[in-house]
Image (cartoon, rainbow, N blue to C red):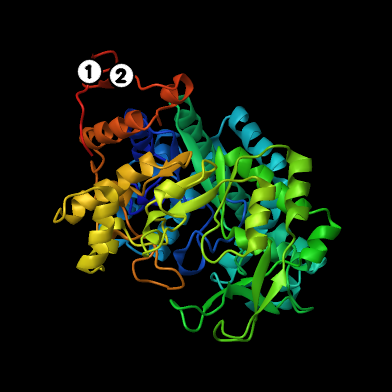
């Protein structure tokens, strides 16, 4: 469940009180990980996979109430109250405009009244993150001055990064550029505090790293030679997937592709820094579209679909060898879904990263590798990911024969309800051989496709908009999940001891506990 899906009175989930409450729920439920989506500033289509930066944090996730507590915004601020009328602000665009206004006010207050210690911390943050922050803040200031048009539509002197023009702009917009840096400072103050709290509660943050970078990003604007662009900084080839039975014209993602020859010339330093940075943000990171490191589908940029593309060779173990040499052991998971060639499988084996199993792909009639009895230990199992239907939505599309096959596999009664099947799938994920099991929040809550997070290769459709209702995650859910974790040796204490143990749940206050009885999911 992404942070944006938390309940909140400000139109989108934030790093505030509800996030801390969710950590408490996870602890009570005997969980180990909270998996989130990419945390970068959302760009085109509001997708966290199309971000203005591979390094920056999303300003929308900054919690306004914490800004009030910091003394940077008045609790009587009229814009704060407008933002809190959540029914009127369902679009990311509206949320962004109001959040930017509030954050600009917070910066003005910080600039005039912050303590010397706070200003030192801000300066220290800027210094330590200058490698990406300077370009990002300048990029966002320019982007705002161009009413958020894509940087390819800027004046040539800015688009092509004329040094004199950028220096003159920076001199005249110093305060605005610093404001964008301050926004990042506040994001990471709040994010790091939440992560520290989660880790102290025994909850690890499982993050997500998109393989590709948005064309409309500070990263490509600042490093054009590292991507497949022409001399005018226009993409020559873009990313996507070839046609298949699900998509007769393929998937045209549109992200510029990496110039792996140039990446190799600099020792893959850009990727090494990206992985290093991710390892400080997250305790575990999923790398999206792992097969693209073995070979990737390249589509001419002028094409309107993905029919006429070609497969090109990726960096393979040269990249991961460089990462390992520079960083040592890093905690990564490979998103290895879809059609995998023998060379992709070998790359995953050589890299040693866990792959993924998705139960929604498992019941096609043969002895699929996605069925729980076939999972390897070094893997992560899901019922579905953010790109799939919810389990209830998936079952709603099936005929009786398909459901009968799933019931038979799960050992369920012949005519049991779809809710029972979803609960059986959750149990099957916990019982699988995979070292780690991740369940979508929507499946815990037994929600249908109205709560689906994303439909790939589409814009709109409610993508990225789902939010849990306040109080959705109850003690009853926590008890059931904890019982499953205990039954299948997934409680951290049990993994160490190798045997199930009785762990009680706090009922009213710390220290006041009561022994559980067995509860079926």
Q: Residue furthest left?
A: 415
Q: Which residue is mark 2?
A: 502
SS of the residue under disc 2:
loop
Residue 209 x/y as whole percent: 57, 53
- Residue 413: mark: none
CA distance for labels 2 and 1: 8 Å
Give the label, 2 or 1, closer to the camera: 2
Number of callouts in the render?
A: 2
Point 27% across, 60% down: residue = 405
| Rendered position, 169 above or below 473 | below
Residue 80 visible within the image? yes
Per the image, label 1 sits on a secondary structure element best described as loop
Residue at left offset 58%, top offset 71%? 146
On screen, residue 13 versus residue 236, left or right, reads: left
Residue 466 sits in quarter:
bottom left
> The C terminus lies in which quarter of the figure?
top left
* Residue position for label 1: 515
């Amino acid at each position: 469940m992404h942070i944006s899906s938390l309940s909140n009175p400000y139109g989108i989930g934030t790093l505030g009180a509800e996030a801390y409450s969710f950590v408490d729920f996870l602890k009570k439920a005997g969980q180990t990980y909270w998996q989130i989506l990419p945390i970068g500033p959302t760009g085109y289509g509001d997708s966290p996979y199309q971000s203005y930066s591979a390094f920056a944090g999303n300003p929308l996730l900054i919690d306004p109430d914490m800004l009030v507590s910091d003394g940077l915004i008045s609790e009587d601020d009229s814009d704060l109250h407008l933002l809190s009328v959540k029914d009127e602000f369902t679009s990311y665009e509206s949320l962004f405009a109001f959040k930017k206004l509030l954050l600009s006010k917070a910066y003005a207050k910080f600039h005039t009244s912050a303590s010397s210690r706070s200003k030192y911390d801000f300066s220290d943050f800027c210094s330590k993150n200058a490698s990406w922050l300077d370009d990002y803040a300048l990029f966002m200031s320019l982007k705002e001055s161009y009413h958020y048009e894509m940087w390819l539509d800027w004046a040539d002197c800015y688009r092509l990064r004329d040094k004199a023009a950028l220096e003159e702009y920076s001199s005249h917009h110093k305060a605005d550029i610093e404001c964008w840096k301050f926004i990042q400072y506040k994001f990471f103050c709040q994010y790091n505090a939440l992560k520290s709290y989660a880790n102290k509660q025994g909850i690890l943050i499982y993050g997500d790293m998109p393989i590709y970078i948005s064309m409309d990003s500070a990263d490509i604007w600042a490093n054009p030679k590292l991507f497949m662009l022409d001399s005018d900084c226009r993409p020559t080839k873009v990313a996507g997937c070839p046609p298949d039975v699900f998509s007769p014209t393929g998937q045209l993602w549109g992200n510029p592709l990496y110039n792996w020859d140039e990446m190799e010339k600099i020792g893959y330093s850009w990727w090494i820094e990206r992985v290093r940075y991710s390892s400080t943000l997250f305790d575990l990171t999923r790398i999206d579209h792992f097969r693209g490191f073995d070979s990737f589908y390249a589509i001419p940029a002028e094409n309107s679909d993905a029919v006429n593309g070609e497969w090109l060779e990726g960096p393979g173990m040269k990249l991961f060898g460089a990462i390992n040499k520079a960083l040592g052991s890093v905690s990564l998971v490979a998103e290895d879904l879809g059609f995998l060639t023998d060379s992709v499988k070998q790359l995953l084996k050589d890299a040693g990263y866990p792959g993924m199993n998705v139960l929604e792909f498992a019941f096609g009639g043969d002895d699929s590798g996605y069925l729980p009895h076939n999972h390897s230990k070094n893997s992560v199992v899901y019922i579905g990911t953010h790109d799939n239907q919810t389990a209830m939505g998936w079952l709603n599309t099936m005929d009786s024969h398909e459901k009968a096959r799933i019931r038979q596999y799960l050992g369920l009664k012949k005519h049991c309800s779809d809710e029972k099947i979803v609960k059986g799938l959750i149990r099957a994920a916990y019982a699988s051989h995979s070292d780690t099991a991740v369940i979508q929040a929507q499946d815990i809550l037994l929600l249908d496709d109205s709560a689906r997070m994303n439909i790939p290769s589409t814009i709109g459709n409610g993508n990225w908009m789902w939010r849990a209702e306040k109080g959705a995650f109850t003690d009853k859910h926590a008890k059931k999940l904890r019982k499953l974790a205990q039954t299948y040796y997934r409680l951290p204490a049990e993994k160490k001891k190798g045997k199930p143990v009785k762990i009680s749940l706090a009922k009213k206050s710390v220290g006041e506990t009561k022994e559980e009885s067995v509860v079926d999911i």
